[in-house]
Image (cartoon, coloured by chain):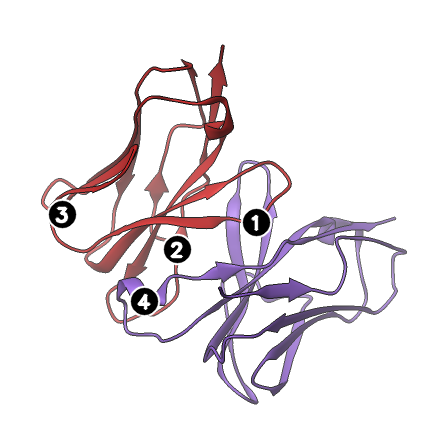
């Protein structure tokens, strides 16, 4: 595997900000994906980073630093519907299959 | 919108039975995937197909086989189901294999299989 590490669980309050970190040990990769998965449902695509820096999409942003082997997903103005599992995944160089982290379950409380 | 459908949402089978899980995508995608998802282990790739009649083993192919006779359909077969194959099975498809954002995978709703 690609040793992709994410925290198992996080809890935050409605309206707050939460940052989900993803670290990986791989010699290189084409790009890094973030997916959202609600309980009992399929994962859905959130974001893709290929260059270092921040990609912003509304309330969600994703950051990548290749030199540090690190990415994060930032969720702002949390809503109850954001309660879900968030999966980090990479496509290693020379490969075309995604390798997934185990996912971070975010619980948003009122 | 890409649509990936799976034949069943819930399935209960007995040990030793042969099980077929069907997946169909309607966007002419080249690549199709079968994963299983278990608590604490995340998504693990079972098999992958990049073209009709072509298949490639993923990380955990033991106990499974696949079939891709048509571009839109990818089947996962459990030749003799065992209790340790109780899991959520997810099918996915993607357009290309270039490592770009366009390679994002689109997932089906999943089949929760219980083997008794």
Nearer the observer: mark 4 or 2; the answer is 4
Q: Is mark 3 on a helix, strand or loop?
A: loop
Q: Are circles 4 and 1 on residues that touch, CB within 8 Å?
A: no
Residue under label 1, please give it: A42
The hue in which chain B appears in the rendered picture of the protein = purple
Nearer the observer: mark 3 or 4; the answer is 4
Q: Which chain carries label 3?
A: A
Q: How crowded is mark 3: few (under 14 residues within 10 Å), some or many (20 or more)?
A: some
Which residue is rendered at x = 45% and y = 28% of the image?
Answer: A8
Q: Distance between the residues labelled 4 and 2?
A: 16 Å
Residue A30 image point, x, y percent: 22, 62
Q: What element carries label 2?
A: strand
Which residue is rendered at x = 87% and y = 63% of the image?
Answer: B16
Which residue is rendered at x = 46% and y = 40% of the image?
Answer: A102
Residue under label 4, please give it: B102
Residue under label 3, please give it: A66
Residue B54 image point, x, y percent: 52, 86
Q: Mark 2 lies on which chain?
A: A
Q: Do labels 4 and 1 share a chain?
A: no
Q: How far apart are marks 1 and 2 (CA)?
A: 16 Å
Disc sitting over residue A99 in the figure: 2
Instruction: Indicate the chain coloured red by its letter.
Output: A
Q: How crowded is mark 4: few (under 14 residues within 10 Å), some or many (20 or more)?
A: few
Q: In this view, does A27 lie to the left or right of B113?
A: left
Disc sitting over residue A58 in the figure: none
Residue B86 image point, x, y percent: 74, 49
Q: Is residue A84 above or below residue A2?
A: above
Q: Distance between the residues labelled 3 and 4?
A: 20 Å
């Amino acid at each position: 595997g690609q040793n992709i590490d994410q925290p198992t669980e996080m809890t935050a309050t409605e309206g707050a900000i939460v940052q989900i970190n993803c670290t990986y040990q791989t010699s290189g990769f084409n790009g890094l994906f973030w997916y959202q998965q609600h309980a009992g449902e399929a994962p859905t695509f959130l974001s893709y980073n290929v260059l270092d820096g921040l990609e912003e999409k509304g309330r969600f942003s994703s950051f990548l630093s290749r030199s540090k082997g690190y990415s994060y997903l930032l969720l702002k103005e949390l809503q109850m519907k954001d309660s879900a599992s968030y999966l980090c995944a990479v496509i290693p160089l020379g490969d075309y299959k995604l390798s997934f982290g185990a996912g971070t379950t975010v619980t948003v409380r009122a | 919108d890409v649509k990936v459908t799976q034949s069943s949402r819930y399935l209960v089978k007995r040990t030793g039975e042969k099980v077929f899980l069907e997946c169909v995508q309607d966007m002419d995608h080249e690549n199709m995937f079968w994963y299983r998802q278990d608590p604490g282990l995340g998504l693990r790739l079972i098999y992958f197909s990049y073209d009709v009649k072509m298949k490639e083993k993923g990380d955990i192919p033991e106990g499974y086989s696949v079939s891709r006779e048509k571009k839109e359909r990818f089947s996962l077969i459990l030749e003799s189901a065992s209790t340790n194959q109780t899991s959520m099975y997810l099918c996915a498809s993607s357009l290309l294999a270039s490592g770009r954002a366009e390679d994002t995978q689109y997932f089906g709703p999943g089949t929760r299989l219980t083997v008794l």
